[in-house]
Amino acid sequence: MTVMTLSKALNAGLRAAMEADARVLLMGEDIATLGGVFRVTDGLAKDFGEGRVIDTPLSEAGIVGTAIGLALRGYRPVCEIQFDGFVYPAYDQIVTQLAKMHYRSAGRVQLPVVIRIPFGGGIGAVEHHSESPEAYFAHTPGLKVVSCADASDAYVMIQQAIASDDPVIFFEPKRRYWDKAEVDQTQDLLDAAVTPLHAARIVRVGRDVTVVAYGPMVKTCLAAALSAADCNQELEVIDLRSLSPLDFEPVLSSVRKTGRLVVVHEAPRTVGLGAEICARVSEECFYHLEAPPLRVTGFDTPYPPARLEEHYLPDVERILTSVDIVMSHR
Amino acid sequence: MADSESFVQLLTPSGHYRQHNEYAVDFTPQQYRDIYRDLVIVRRLDAEATALQRQGELGLWASLLGQEAAQVGSGRALQPQDVAFPSYREHGVAWCRGLDPIAPLRLFRGVDHGAWDPADTNFHLYTIVIGSQTLHATGYAMGVTKDGQVGSEDGAAVITYFGDGATSQGDLNEALIWASGFAAPVVFFCQNNQYAISAPSTRQSRIPLYLRAAGFGLPGIQVDGNDVLACYSVTQAALRRARLGEGPTFIEAYTYRMAAHTTSDDASRYRPSSEVELWQQRDPIARYRAYLEREQLADAEFFADTDSQAQQLALKLRAQTLALPDPPPRAIFDQVYAEPSAQLAEQQEKFAAYLDSFADNDGEAATAGSQGLGGSTS
Ligand SMILES: Cc1ncc(C[n+]2csc(CCOP(=O)(O)OP(=O)(O)O)c2C)c(N)n1
């Protein structure tokens, strides 16, 4: 076990994937010489060469479009989009081509492309640097969408994503890049004990309320669970990890136990992931529910200026407010 | 990819005037001095903003250091009726347009996203997404033509600013196609400061950028971006072409970003300090001052006056920045739409009730009505 930051864990995971498979290559703006604006790819160009860690022109459509071509040629490109708000020039390539090639070719063409996107707010950034666009991608059949929440998962999940034969949109919680955790670099990823890429995980067991989150909000929910415990409320926190496909089973069985659900994400509320989870829980667990499922989310506004973001982002207080509401139903 | 043969240069790095057979300036002594004042002021305000960021008063700052001549030269060539579409580094153009210098600092402090009225100074909002604004400028210019405002010396023209990195974006390439095809009265002003964050401009293009214009069917011209007189003259001619209805021009101002990309960037990771030192010898302000002195267009008193005026403005900018209030939390919901949205209004009300619940309970956690914040599904 080594203690490392989430950013370093991704770096280690990318390194392991590149060592394991010579067809893995990284491409993105400022990722080689600079090591990425968050230093996720730091040192990799030096060790693997600029042929495998490619500083691209400033063109996201180009990054994803050529990654598709490289994948057609047998490579496994891992693209970095510098910030969430800059993925849109590539959106056409992602939605119309990357997502659909397998289907269009009746399964003859596979596109094992990973698109890494630092996402979410909380770092005091200017416009377009704090967004949570995951629902656009989760709403696109043909794409797999995941998000890691801590260093240990980051190390494993990035390798699993690269090994996947489907395109994976890999959301990295940028405000957690500097958070440290223990990472086991000796584990065999094929070991049955390793959580699969598309499985949710219970990160804290509790009997009273099921709290579902992913990415940066997992840490916030765990903090909320700690405070709730002081008031004798036991929250069960589930890290979804995979946003498409969604692993509903752990959520459903948890809600059958607790009878109460709160879903938390930074993205705007309407038509977000929370809506899907609440809908599914209502369909499957209606008779187990003690209270209407609630969502704690960003608002239906553009991401606000940095000086307002603390009010926009769900925090412990807001989560506990909703916990109190679902608990008040007897 | 430029040298004094390929680009238009009127002032050498040592401040000597060079005759050019096509370009010249026709300034009164006062105009020469005004330009100098602009250069010094925009550099001083930029340094103040950088200092404010270092002291934690701004979240970020994108410095224009080294690009003053490109921005003041082109910015002062604009007529009041002309409209500029900037990226995020055009603080010098903003100054020339008459935008209050505090406006960009509000954005970089994080109290708003820009929020100035573009119509007040004919200076559009900063655009952070690389290349987007070039299409807006093109469409706006098409509108200028539709409104019959081209075809004479007092017609209107549009100018858009972007960097060398932006030339790789689809949006800019499409803008060139549209502007050319519709003979839009727009000037594409590329500040080739030689880096897109860490990527050298050779990563974007193997040929000088101005040569690309020909393939799109518009004239391309390269100018010494550290020569304020050349930038003025070349931009003025391109704007005139646009005004007269002769169509778009692509200008590559060859310059150098003397500071890091932004205050978050560490330029030592990708360029040697010897390169920066080399460019310091081509400093746009030093050369212009040398010229003014040699030609006796300004005296020591003027230079001292200018410095103290810049200093006063910097102090004012600092005071204004420190006095900027944070917006009230409920402002998050304002101005999302031009017309009211009942859905959003409901969310805003709930949020207000949530905030009020803290006021009532003196900071204690409280329950906001019967529905969770962000709403319930019931
Ligand atoms: C579409 C998009 N992709 C990525 C970025 C991140 N980014 C911000 S500035 C920049 C480099 C821009 O270089 P250039 O166009 O040369 O302008 P300069 O900053 O040098 O003035 C990048 C990659 C962005 N703002 N927009």
Image (spheres, rainbow, N blue to C red):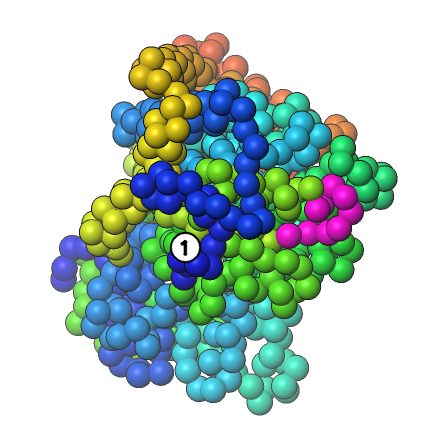
The quarter of the picture where the N terminus of chain B appears is bottom left
Q: Which amino acid type is marked by label 1?
A: Ser
Which of these two is toward me, A111 or A82? A82
Badge 1: residue crowd in 10 Å (few <14, some 14–19, many ≥20): few
Q: In the picture shown, does residue B111 fall above or below A98?
A: above
Hey, which residue is sitting farthest bottom in the picture? A108
Label 1 sits on a secondary structure element that is: loop
**Marked residue chain, label 1:** B
Residue B4 in picture, x, y percent from top left: 41, 55
Which of these two is toward me, B204 or A155? B204
Q: How many marks?
A: 1
The quarter of the picture where the C terminus of chain B appears is top right
The magenta stretch spans residue B248: yes
Residue of label 1: B4
Residue range of the region highlighted in magenta in the rendering: B241-249
Residue B375 in picture, x, y percent from top left: 60, 34
Q: In the picture shown, does residue B204 fall above or below B320?
A: below
Residue B298 in picture, x, y percent from top left: 39, 20
Q: Residue at x 35, y 38 (%)?
A: B15
Q: Quadrant of residue A1?
A: bottom left
Q: Is residue A313 left or right of residue B315?
A: right
**Residue A292 visible here:** no
Q: Residue at x 74, y 41 (%)?
A: B243
Q: Quadrant of residue B341?
A: top right
